[in-house]
Image (tube, helix red, strand yellow):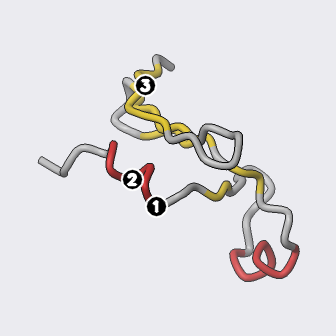
Amino acid sequence: MKLTLLGSVYENGQSPTIFATDAGTYVVQGWKIMDSEALAQMKIPDHETAVEIPAELLRFVPPSA
C-alpha cells in the first residue's frame, strides 16, 4: 500500500496525521483510545481498531468528487 501524506496537526506534543492510499482509502494516525466505556459503545471487532483525532485534521481530506 502506498501512502501519501495529506496533512498533520501538532497538538499536545503529538502529531495526528492523515494519509491517502493508492486504494482510494485513508489511513489515520491518532491517539489510541483507552477508555473502556467508549470502546464498548463502538463494539469493535478484533480485526479493527479506533483512534481519536482532532477535528482540525479533517481539513486535509479532499472533498468528494
Residue 52 vertical placement versus 22 (above, below): below
List x then y, in percent, for residue 3: 46, 21
Q: What's the distance in space between the residues labelled 2 and 3, CA to CA?
A: 13 Å
Q: Residue at x 33, y 43 (%)?
A: 60
- The residue lying furthest to the left in this view is 65
Q: How crowded is mark 1: few (under 14 residues within 10 Å), some or many (20 or more)?
A: few
Please tell me whether residue 27 is drawn above or below residue 54 in the rendered image.
above
In the picture shown, does residue 65 fall above or below 4? Answer: below
Which amino acid type corresponds to the residue marked 3 in the rendered image? Leu
Q: Residue at x 75, y 62 (%)?
A: 45
52 left or right, relative to 8: right
Judge left or right: residue 34 versus residue 38.
right
Residue annotated with mark 3: 5
Q: Quadrant of residue 51?
A: bottom right
> Is 20 or 56 nearer to us in this picture?
56
Badge 2 local density, few (<14 within 10 Å), some, or many (20+)? Answer: some
In terms of sequence position, does the residue under pointer 2 or pointer 3 come before the other?
A: 3
Q: Name the residue under label 2.
A: 58
Q: How far apart are marks 2 and 1 (CA)?
A: 6 Å
Identify which residue is drawn at 77% across, 61% down.
33
Q: Are marks 2 and 1 in contact (CB under 8 Å)?
A: yes
The reply to whether callout 2 and callout 3 are in contact (CB within 8 Å) is no
SS category of the residue bearing label 3:
strand
Instruction: Give the mark nearest the N terminus, 3 or 1.
Output: 3
Residue 18, compared with residue 31, is above or below; it is above
Q: Where is residue 36? Give x, y as percent.
A: 88, 74
Indicate which disc residue 55 carries: 1
The amino acid beneath tag 1 is: Ala
